[in-house]
């Protein structure tokens, strides 16, 4: 047996936290990580149960991005939450985590233009506007193919997408999740509506910052008919360039979005504030203290944090929790390694991030003293 954990190196990061009534044993969050192990039917399976329970020492787990509908597809073999079999698959994962005392939120996802017609029976993907991703290729069911120009959603179609989010949130509740996170980051559909680079609409969903934020506001409002606000989070990426994002008015847009979200009394705002995976360089990056001035609830920082920088962010009250992504890939016992000062495993090879089996997924070693 190990001796009692020593928390002197990270007393803030490893301390408990009350997340709107949900007791977290530490402030280490497992970030959403798309791992593509759900198969063609997108049903969570036993391998995924093992993967998540291996990482159950996190204070909070946010699941990989999970599609709310078939229209939301854009990633091969990612899981869904729009039918009974998927709901049942997630229920097994939730039960396994709850048996270990770990709370878990489901991340709700629609890829929008970050998709391809081969996911949609030959029909174009949808977006805020008909603007193609400026990139090389996308992984599709038919292999790597060039990006395509999406179709702009008609005004009358938007309500149906909002309803898809509401239904998916209802299924997440039925599966036993502790809450849901709305994925409004990283260039996926909601982010495409938020940002002027991808939103050139002239209806009530475009033309002003208020209108650009309307789609997200309607989704939050719909989900709050299913979940209390204290069990709903939102993820934003104000500095990111992933999926060809980044708008000149990003600071105005994301300040307004965060202020509007604050009024709902949400569980948290999850910010991809770090620059480790790319920065659009359209101004000074937005920081957690900047969001503190407009969002009154808990803040989660994410992207490129180390144990040391995470501890500093929480100690300075810039963040309440820190989400770790890539370190959790190869370190299922990441919290224990932080707690005891143990060396981390080498990073996972990108080639196995989305492999079809246990390789690079559930086969990373726990520390010998764990």
Image (spheres, rainbow, N blue to C red):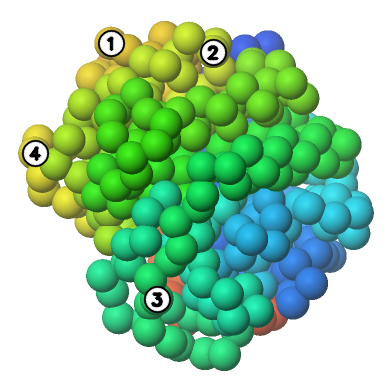
Is residue 14 among the parts visible in the rendering? no
Residue 199 on image: x %, y %: 32, 46
**Residue named by callout 1:** 293
Q: Nearer the viewer, residue 341 or 345?
A: 345
Q: Nearer the viewer, residue 239 or 164?
A: 164
Mark 1 to mark 2 CA distance (whole Å): 16 Å
**Residue named by callout 2:** 264
Closest to the camera, between mark 1 and mark 3, is 3
Q: Earlier in the sequence, mark 2 or mark 4?
A: 2
Q: Earlier in the sequence, mark 3 or mark 4?
A: 3
Label 1: which secondary element: loop
Residue 270 on image: x %, y %: 45, 32
Q: Nearer the viewer, residue 130 or 253?
A: 130
Mark 1 to mark 3 CA distance (whole Å): 39 Å
- Quarter of the image for residue 176 reads top right
Label 4: which secondary element: loop
- Quarter of the image for residue 362 reads bottom right
- Specify the quadrant that holds the N terminus: top right
Closest to the camera, between mark 3 and mark 2, is 3
**Residue named by callout 3:** 148
């Amino acid at each position: 047996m190990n001796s009692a954990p020593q928390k002197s190196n990270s007393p803030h990061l490893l301390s408990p936290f009350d997340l709107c009534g949900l007791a977290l044993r530490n402030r280490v969050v497992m970030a959403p990580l798309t791992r593509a192990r759900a198969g063609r039917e997108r049903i969570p399976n036993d391998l995924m149960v093992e993967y998540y329970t291996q990482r159950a020492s996190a204070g909070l787990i946010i699941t990989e991005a999970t599609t709310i509908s078939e229209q939301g597809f854009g990633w091969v073999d990612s899981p869904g939450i729009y039918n009974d079999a998927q709901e049942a698959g997630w229920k097994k994962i939730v039960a396994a985590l709850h048996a270990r005392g770990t709370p878990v939120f489901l991340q709700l996802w629609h890829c929008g233009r970050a998709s391809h017609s081969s996911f949609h029976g030959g029909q174009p993907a949808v977006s805020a506007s008909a603007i193609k991703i400026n990139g090389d290729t996308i992984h599709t069911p038919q292999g790597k193919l060039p990006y395509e120009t999406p179709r702009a959603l008609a005004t009358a179609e938007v309500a149906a997408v909002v309803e898809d989010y509401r239904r998916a949130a209802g299924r997440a509740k039925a599966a036993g999740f502790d809450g849901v996170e709305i994925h409004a980051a990283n260039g996926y559909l909601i982010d495409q509506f938020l940002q002027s680079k991808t939103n050139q609409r002239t209806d009530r969903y475009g033309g002003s910052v208020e209108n650009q934020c309307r789609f997200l506001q309607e989704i939050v409002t719909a989900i709050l008919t299913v979940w209390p606000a204290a069990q709903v989070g939102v993820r934003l990426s104000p500095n990111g360039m992933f999926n060809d994002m980044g708008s000149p008015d990003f600071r105005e847009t994301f300040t307004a979005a965060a202020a509007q979200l604050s009024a709902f009394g949400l569980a948290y705002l999850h910010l991809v504030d770090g620059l480790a995976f790319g920065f659009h360089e359209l101004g000074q990056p937005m920081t957690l203290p900047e969001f503190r001035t407009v969002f009154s609830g808990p803040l989660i920082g994410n992207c490129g944090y180390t144990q040391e920088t995470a501890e500093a962010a929480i100690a300075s009250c810039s963040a309440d929790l820190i989400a770790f992504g890539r370190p959790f890939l190869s370190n299922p016992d990441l919290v224990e390694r932080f707690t005891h000062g143990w060396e981390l495993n080498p990073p996972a090879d990108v080639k196995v991030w989305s492999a079809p089996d246990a390789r690079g997924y559930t086969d990373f070693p726990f520390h010998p003293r764990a």
